[in-house]
Image (spheres, rainbow, N blue to C red):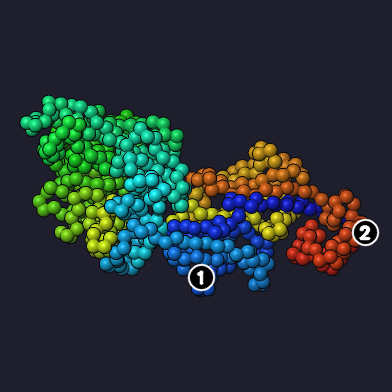
Amino acid sequence: MFKQKIYIYLFFIQLLIAGFLPLDNSSINYTQVFFKWPQINGAQFYTLSIEDDSSENFQINTISNSVIVDSFLNWNNSYNWTVCGIDEINNYPLCYETFSLSINSLPSYYPNNIEVIFSSDLYSPGITLLDFDSMGFSAAINKQGYPVWFVDKSLFGQFNSKILVTQLLKSGNFVGLGLGKGYEFDINGNIDFVTPAEYDIHHHFIKLDSTYLLIDGHIESHPCPSPCPDNLPEDILWLGDRYVEIDLDGNLIWDWNTFDYISLDDYNPLYLQRLSNNYEAGDYLDWTHSNSLFYDDNNQTVFISIRNLSRIINIDYNSRNIIWQVSGDNDLMANSYFDNDIVFSQQHSVQKNSNDRIIFFDNHSYLDPEISKCIEFEYNSDSLNIVWDYTLPNDLFTGSRGECERLENGNTLINVGRTGNLLEVDNNSDLIWHLSMKNDNSEVASFRSSRIDNLYPLAYSFIINDLQGFYNEQNYYYNDLNDDFEFTIYNIGWSKQIYDFMILDFESNLLYSDSILINANDSQLIEIDLSEISIVPNQLVHFKIIPVENPNLYQEIYFSIINYNLGDVNYDGIINVLDVILMVNSIIDGNNNNSFDLNLDGVNDILDIVLLINIILN
């Protein structure tokens, strides 16, 4: 008796989701590039070849059908690239056609004087994502200070456009702040979300799992505090802040208003005096001037930084009550929550570290001496204690902006605000890396910066085991005697990801689904028992993989399942001499039909004819 085989013919859609990345003739604003291509039957590994205009060639080998290239590619250059599969005896089953790629020039507003002042081997690996606040855009730079990505600010407004990145999400999207607006956008600057017009956002905009948090200015009329300058009216306008959470459709979810929780007795006389200088009707007291927010998911609390009151507040998200607050100047806060104090002034960028400690940038403005620093403190119900600080050199004082971020290796990345300097220091306060940013001879102000592995927290591909056929001929098929559909997902991004995968019928009815968590830079072999799935033979179905963090980046393959007896070349249900004649004629004509390839060696020849005759004789 002969065995019955199940052949699964796979028809790949010629779309981004199942084809090549980057798309042919792409023009991009980054030099770290994710390449992806359809798998090649028989390939044990792949060789990606990239050639520039001067015919200089770069090659990289990989067992997966995707790779991130972070060298060789440069600004204002064009490239051709192709991929070849290599089999187990170093033959080339197939090389794909050549694709073109262009990397744009840096924009005219890119700072022209960026210099690494100092660098050591203890640099925390990766690239630095930062904003050039005074230039109105954001970029990413490597250890040597060379740009690897920028976002075109003209995409975020026709006039006086601006985009300052605040986050790179696990989805691969960026979150950033424009002129009064918050945005989520992809690596190419394509906007996925913009905040509703009712909000005039300032200083900070971030995304949580499925909502956004923002700071919105809020003005109310209240009595002028005593002693009130003579030229001010009895009632003046106070500018406070609302911390607002909205959903993915822009609907209000949660808010917290400074007017509801902070006494008007707590104000900074400095800004009242500024209001009285050249006062005109409609001017307001810059009361709070909040500049950062941080959501602690573990404890469901929100940390906020109120610059003009030199105050940090920890808020219970559910009740909205203040858990504790600390001020660097007790004259600006009536009630003290801790037994001891920390001296700081006009701080920025309050964050909570993984060890539950608070770290922030202390501008130290209006104190004597004015020397900026990073402060990290721990706290309990009664007291707080500084566990680490780093005092910047006298010439790096910055009156505004600034951020201190703890890195994975324990170092701290310091953005020194208006001075145009980035520093990395270790826990012993030793300098590890120092970058200077100027445009001509003027310092480039910056606000936020973070260290990331590369531009791709989410980058993946998949390979189906024992896949037969070729993409170019659109005749992939899968042969599995044991009814096991096996595939491997390669997660080559730097963030662990959850992937949903499913099989649907031709009417998009779900036949099978499951999900899997794959660690960063890892892969996972997955098996699906087709015998337990109600798939109708000869009907179109498709297989789909969806990354949970970004469903828009799904990949899918359409296929049909055909049951037939091995050797039944004409599918008439009988194996006889007619099948032999058809196979012989096909071989004579020089055709290569996968359904005639009985020994699965990739070619049609006399060996297949011999096997077919033996099937008939047996």
Tell me, yes or no, whether the two marked residues, 1 and 2, touch with CB atoms within 8 Å.
no
Estimate the x, y position of residue 335 in percent, counting from the top left. 16, 33
Residue of label 2: 577
Q: Is residue 193 visible?
A: yes
Q: Is residue 101 above or below residue 243?
A: below
Q: Amino acid at mark 1?
A: Asp
- Residue 64 is left or right of residue 232, and the answer is right
Position of residue 378 measured from the top left corner of the image (x, y, whole percent): 24, 46
> In the rendered image of this protein, does residue 554 appear above or below residue 455?
above
Q: Is residue 30 shown left or right of residue 512?
A: left
**Residue type beneath disc 2:** Val
Q: Which residue is mark 1?
A: 53
**In the image, is 242 to the left or to the right of 267?**
right
Residue 36 visible? The answer is: no
Q: Residue at x 51, y 69 (%)?
A: 52
Q: Position of residue 581 (x, y in %)?
A: 90, 61
